[in-house]
Amino acid sequence: MRTQWIECISVIGFSAVFLFGVAAAHACRHPQRLSRGLDQADVVYYPVHGDAGGLAHINYWTMDPATLAEREQLKARRIRSNPLHSSLFHPHQVISGYEATGILNVQGRRQWITLKLPDDWNGKLVVCGTPGLGNEYANETILAPWLLASGYAVVSGNKGLESSWVSMLSGTHPTRHWGRMMHDMAKWARYRLTVATYRRVKRIYAAGLSNGGYQVRRALEIDNSLPRWRRVFHGGLDWSGTYFPDARVLDANRDGTVDIKEYHAARTLVGHMDVACRTMKWAYDPETLTTPAQYAETPRYPDAHGPMTAAGFNSASDIFWGYYNTNYDNYKDQGLPQWRGVGYFNLISHVYRAELLGHDLEQSAAYSCFHDPNRPEAPPALYQWLENARYGGWTAESIQWALANANTAEFKAPMITLVGDADGLLAIDAHSLAYRRAVEKYGRKGLHRLYVIENGPHVDAHADGAVDFNFDGVSGNEDADLELTPMQAYAQRAFMYLEQWVENGASPPESKTVANDPSQDMDDPNLLAW
């Protein structure tokens, strides 16, 4: 069922709702109204005491899903498929409130969403972008718990990717909808909260990590193109967001078009993943750089630094280069031999290229990142394909699809970008620094701040040092946790700056690099200032 939006409801109608709601309590007055407009909708109240661990589902990280009610078992499994948080931030505070789930369908943009409303609601809403290719519960530890504990309603969706990376190989170019989906959630949730609580939504913020950070950027940029009365967002927190440059940035010769050579030469998401793949090589190739010996060198992987830094990676991120080249390799020991030697670098190169080219799994087999178990010594097809492909295989049509995703760097609501200088996945100079340069050139730099956190990773879970950084078959023996700083407390502090900026006009500190001691991780944002 397609949602019926309330943009058609008159100002008089809104005023009546607010007038009659003056004496409304904090509790939700009509919980069933929270899910109207959703297909396969469900509304559940989560008390302080119960198996779920409250609205933030804090027990679901440790409980056996089979011990839960049938309705909750799938939710628990979906929550536990998103271990992005450092153990420093394992949720512990139990918040009571309502959760509405279901499928939001707006003009064919179909996504599973979850809307959480705490009992002690502060009247504000945070629309959360989704990291990576995760599901609607991907923010359960990194954003939702502390926002709920602070009284915010929180809505999040799965960007329409019901089968994660497989959905990217659908030939339908799903990434073009990701920014609009943030808008869809914001407008739907704003009305649902109003009619369910008889209270006006006072502020709407966007927040997200990685691809969720990209959604924040696009949502505020989309707002920029709308009349003032139709704008949705009051501010945004972009945490290590992905950057898709627009034609003004890509058109190197300034002839008014972006040709195949220009797109191939640019520091795009796929482009710098291609460099990482070719530089580090398949982990089981005799010439791979992904070895314990290379990791032990100073600097790590010394032969990789030239091409990797030229592609935009910071030298401080070299701690991750071997791991992100192989981080799915352990799937081979779980009955999935095709994942041998697969990591973020080669998976993203394969999947996002196919998304932009409009290829399905069969069509993209020529540049597949997956190992063929029948050819145990042969690298996946991707590596030879990258050596032979002319201009990365890009076509004029695929460039137009890429431009459909593009960031304009123009927005009218304050935005804070936060990134770690040890981000080994999204090259800092190709994403966060490049976006800042675009804002300075095309946007309103006074509405933007960029904070670079020393020793910060892309994903906080990896800052605990419990993964196999040097690919020696043993996890957590490199003492990497002593070199890395979890970002979440900094993200929470940045959000506090954002809120004060939006609501009190208090300008946050100017853009800067924030120093820290990685051996003394900070988990309390109230003790941070820069």
Image (tube, rainbow, N blue to C red):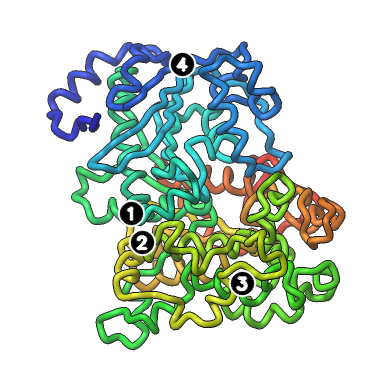
Give the mark, 3 or 1, whose residue is nearer the N terminus: 1
Q: Are marks 2 and 1 in contact (CB under 8 Å)?
A: yes
Q: Which residue is mark 2?
A: 358
Amino acid type at circle 3 is Ala
Give the mark, 2 or 1, whose residue is nearer the N terminus: 1
- Which percent across, then down, holds residue 324? 66, 61
**Which residue appears farthest toward the front when viewing the image?**
374
Mark 4 vs mark 3: give the one in front: 3
Q: Is residue 375 above or below residue 17?
A: below
Mark 2 vs mark 4: give the one in front: 2
**Secondary structure of the residue carrying numbered label 1:** loop
- Which percent across, then down, holds residue 224? 27, 55
Mark 3 vs mark 1: give the one in front: 1
Q: CA distance from mark 4 to mark 3?
A: 45 Å
Amino acid type at circle 1 is Thr
Q: Which residue is mark 3?
A: 276
